[in-house]
Image (tube, rainbow, N blue to C red):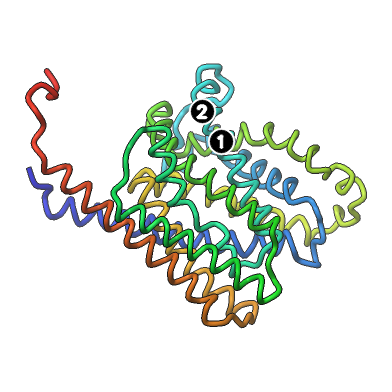
Amino acid sequence: MREPRGDLCSRYVKIFIVVSCYWIISIATVFVNKTLLSSGSVSLEAPLFITWFQCVVSFSICFTLSKTGGIPGIFNFPNGSPWKLEVVRKVIPLSIMFTLMIATNNLCLKYVGVAFYYIGRSLTTVFNVLFSWLLLRQTTSIRCVLCCAAIIFGFYLGVDQESLLGSFSLVGTMYGVIGSLMLSLYSIFTKKVLPSVNQEVWLLSYYNNAYSIILFLPLILINGELGVLLDYKNFHSKYFWMQMLIGGVCGFAIGFVTSLQIKVTSPLTHNISGTAKACAQTVLATQWYSETKNALWWTSNLIVLGSSAMYARFKQIEMEEKSRKPVPEEKRSLV
């Protein structure tokens, strides 16, 4: 049966609002984090501690909402506790991916500019195809594989041009690649974990941040940030803590809208939306920081964006063709 026109329209409006919120909050979060990680007014060489503090703020917001039941008249916060053994067992693998994803994202952002951040993390679609084959044994059409090859070429061209411009960071680019890998895994496994929390995005955000607070502690020690924190002189500054709180609120918001976008769309749509958002973010960054890029640098961005869009379209066509194929009698559900 066809979906009623009114329901279909309201569904598209909902998706548009969610995607728009994701774009706005995600772009704002990137610029805020870049200020925290690289600004002379902060000057705290401890990116994992900054990320950990954002998780603490996010967890505090979720904990408060869980105790109050939400905001009266606006929404109800679902009941749940992150400290139940059954919940820990089901959610902790996703929380590890979440922790590594936001850690590598901020580490990448510390070493590269906001404009190059898009190229540095452009391999998510390629990792999606790879993990779909390795984990799910799902094959990919030749045309989709060619799109992935074009994305890799665009990534290589962007790295090459960034190097020629003298602003290339190998460490930052490596963190970007790892961030793309973790984002791909996180997107795939979010759909699997959501049923364990009754499809409640709020609970998933609550649990992820609760576990990340613990998971970040050994990472902070391994990264050698304890000595940096002990020597830091601006902990008494109100301006410093105001910036940290703003970053924490943004961290909470981006974690929620990311899960919400995956829920109302799909992991593939989320990744494509993230790629398109990053393109707009790149244009804004070059204007904001008054950066001048050459034609080949912009070409690399267009190659990645165009290839990602073509990949999404090809996958959409393949899914529609698959849905129209009749299911064999022996494979139909008895129910």
Relative height, residue 7 to residue 158 (above, below): above
At x 59%, y 50%, the residue is: 251
The quarter of the rendered structure image containing the C terminus is top left
Q: Which amino acid does label 2 sit on?
A: Val
Relative height, residue 218 to residue 46 (above, below): above
In depth, the one of 120 and 251 nearer the eye is 120
The number of numbered badges drawn on the structure is: 2
Which image quadrant is residue 219 in? top right
The quarter of the rendered structure image containing the N terminus is top left
Q: In this view, does 161 lie to the left or right of 111?
A: left
Q: In this view, does 20 lie to the left or right of 214?
A: left
- One can see residue 105 in this view: yes
Relative height, residue 308 to residue 185 (above, below): below
At x 44%, y 59%, the residue is: 21
Residue 89 percent across, percent down from the top left: 53, 20
Residue wearing tag 2: 91
Which image quadrant is residue 95 in? top right
How far apart, in angstroms, are the residues tagged by discs 1 and 2?
8 Å
Task: Classify 10 Å Cα crowding around label 2: few (below 14), some (14-19), many (20 and above).
Answer: many
Which image quadrant is residue 115 in? bottom right
Residue wearing tag 1: 208
At x 40%, y 58%, the residue is: 273
Q: Which of marks 1 and 2 is nearer the N terminus?
A: 2
Residue 63 percent across, percent down from the top left: 59, 35
